[in-house]
Structure formats: C-alpha cells, structure tokens
Image (cartoon, rainbow, N blue to C red):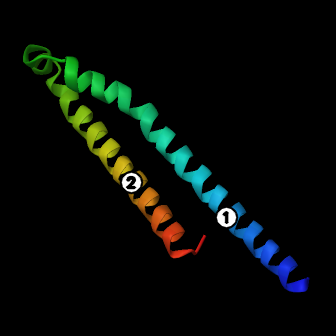
Amino acid sequence: MLKSASLRKTSKQRLDETRELYNSLIARMHQVETRMDPVLFLKHNLNAQAIGALENELGQIRQDVDSLVRDMEASIAESEAFIQRFREGAV
C-alpha cells in the first residue's frame, strides 16, 4: 500500500509538471501567434511601390519579421523539447 501511494504521488507530480510545461508552451505559442498577423499582413499586402515609399520603415519591418522568426523557432524548439521529454518519460 505504501508503494502504491508513492507511485501515485510520483505520477501526480509528473502530471503536474507536464501540465505546467504544456501551459507554458501554449502561452508562448499564443504570444508568437498574436505577432504574426500584422507582420503577415504587411508582407503580403504591400506592393513594390508602397515598399519604395516606406523605405525608411522597411528596415524595421525586416527586424520585426526576423524577431518573429526567432520567436517562432524558439517556440518550436520548446515544443520539440517538451515532446522529447515526454517520450523519454522524464515528465
């Protein structure tokens, strides 16, 4: 009976850790998602003439896109690490 209680406690701890990691991952993905729409809008809806008129802002747009890509890559890496930990039984 003691072993069963110990296993139950360990299982609950792992479940709680998994939930915490999952919630963190989902929050991070939502942060990236909220930044995607404006960047994608700019990327797909500005024609060459508009970009020429906004030359000064083009650098900032590129920085925003680069930042978004880095955040997306970090989010993907987090999700892959989460999945790997789950497969290894560490969670």
Q: Nearer the viewer, residue 8 or 68?
A: 8
- Vertical placement of 27 versus 90: above or below? above
Extreme residue in the right direction: 1
Residue drawn at x 47%, y 62% as measured from the top left: 83
Query: Can you give x and y, in whole percent of width and height, for residue 57 in the image?
Result: 22, 27
Residue 13: image quadrant is bottom right
Q: Is residue 25 left or right of residue 57?
A: right
Circle 1 packing at 10 Å, graded few (<14), some (14-19), many (20+), is: some
Res 6 quadrant in image: bottom right
- Residue 61, image x, y percentages: 25, 32
Q: Say what secondary structure mark 2 lies in.
A: helix
Q: Position of residue 78 (x, y in %)?
A: 45, 59
Quadrant that contains the C terminus: bottom right
Say which amino acid is labelled 1. Glu
Q: Residue drawn 75% across and 75% down?
A: 10
Q: Where does label 2 land, which residue?
A: 76
Q: Residues within 10 Å of mark 2 (few under 14, many from 20)?
A: some
On the image, numbered disc 1 is attached to which residue? 17
Camera-nearest residue between 31 and 50: 31
Q: Residue furthest bottom?
A: 3
Image coordinates of residue 66 in percent, x first then y, are 27, 44
25 w.r.t. 68: above or below:
below
Q: Residue at x 84, y 85 (%)?
A: 3
